[in-house]
Amino acid sequence: MDRQINHPTISEAEIIRPTHVEVNLKAIAENYRKVKKHVAPAKVIIILKANAYGHGLVRIAQFIQELKADYLGVAVVEEGILLREKGITVPILVLGGIWGNQVPLFLKHNLTITASSIDKLKQIDEVAEQMKIKAIVHLKIDTGMERVGVHYYNAEKFLDAAYKCKNIEVEGIFSHFASSDAADLTYTRLQLERFMEVLNYFAKHSIETPMRHISNSGAILQLPEANLDMVRPGIILFGVYPSGEVKRTIEVRPALTWKSLVVYFKVIKPNHPVGYSSSWKADKNIRAVTVPVGYGDGYLRSMSGKAEVIIRGKRYTVIGTISMDQIVVNINNDSAYNGDEVILLGSDGENEIKCEELADWAGTIPYEILTNINTRVPRVYKE
Ligand SMILES: *Cc1c(COP(=O)(O)O)cnc(C)c1O
């Protein structure tokens, strides 16, 4: 099985493509410290799913481990295994459900399992018994997301079952918010209330309460009473806010800059269309440059007609439909030369294109912009 999820880390000297992502590790460290301070004494599970929100799973996990993180979270077991194979020893919670016969893999690699039903508990318990290992489990309660997890109103039977399993250690219990990044927190508060009711179980049965966690970035920013024992920040660590309306109670800065270079200059005559389906043409001579990035890199085609880039400190529009590997930029009457830097996302120090802008152009959310930057785009890390 090929478990290569992210592009291998390469140094700047080895860059073979003009198009690359620069990750500012210092920004991630600062964002992490701010979140940690904001939620203390609650612990932090750093969520690194989807290639660490596009920043490169392995390198980011190594860096986070150096920062002495409490816990890491990933979505699928393959991500957890890759991190273990790369020498990550921090506890890792796999947030997604278990599938088929994956339990031995979790146990073999010392990964914390999300148990989301009584059947799964039984399956985990049996495998753990066979392997003579105690399985570390976090119980997933559904308080209003309707994805995976036992409904809050059926949780008692689930908890009874969990504490009957001799080969399972219940280390944590968690739930997930559906709209904690909204201005209106009514539903979020209702979910928290439902979760707290479930947690009464432990006092009632005189069982030591496992680690309780429910807060994602939105709740960390807006609902401190939901911090409980641990919080699960994802996008905010990378310096991007989960929504436009969320209260920005922690100031974070983006860690990612997506860059390319001008590789071609030309003058385009009037009525000579640009790109596939010939959808764009000028009515006068224009100067244009070609940049080697496209939807095959995650520069989404749906941004066609709206996207802008920064060249030599100025913003210019992308013209014609975005191709798989190339875009054409109208530089009006200005000059640009082969090898000039092109900022697709991020800042040149003065001008900035925000992740939120790309999301608006594409009709999506910042999460999708970051996680779509393809693995063929090399990641370069700045300490
Ligand atoms: C993705 C995810 C998070 C982190 O969400 P952000 O909005 O990026 O902070 C936390 N918990 C779970 C269960 C998740 O799936």
Image: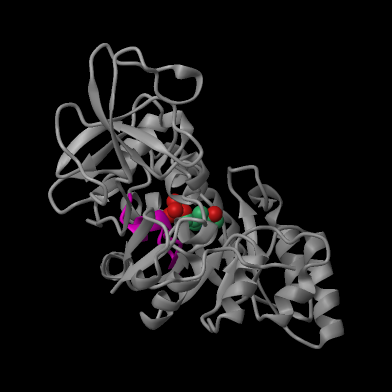
Residue plotted at (15% across, 37% down): 335
233 in the magenta segment: yes
Residue 10 screen position, x and y as percent: 43, 71
For the C terminus, give its image quadrant.
Answer: bottom left
Residue 75 screen position, x and y as percent: 59, 60
Q: In this view, does 366 lie above or below 123?
A: above
Number of residue marks: 0
Horizontal relation, residue 365 to residue 89: left or right:
left
Q: Looking at the image, which is closer to me, 175 or 255?
A: 255
Q: Which colour scheme is used?
A: one colour
Q: Is residue 316 above or below residue 123?
A: above
Residue plotted at (26% across, 68% down): 30
Is residue 216 shown to the viewer in this render?
A: no
Q: Dividing the picture into quarters, in which one does residue 125 lie?
A: bottom right
For the N terminus, give its image quadrant.
Answer: bottom right
168 in the magenta segment: no
> Which stretch is magenta?
225-240
Q: Is residue 64 above or below residue 293?
A: below
Q: Which residue lies furthest to the bottom in this view?
A: 132
Is residue 20 shown to the viewer in this render?
A: yes
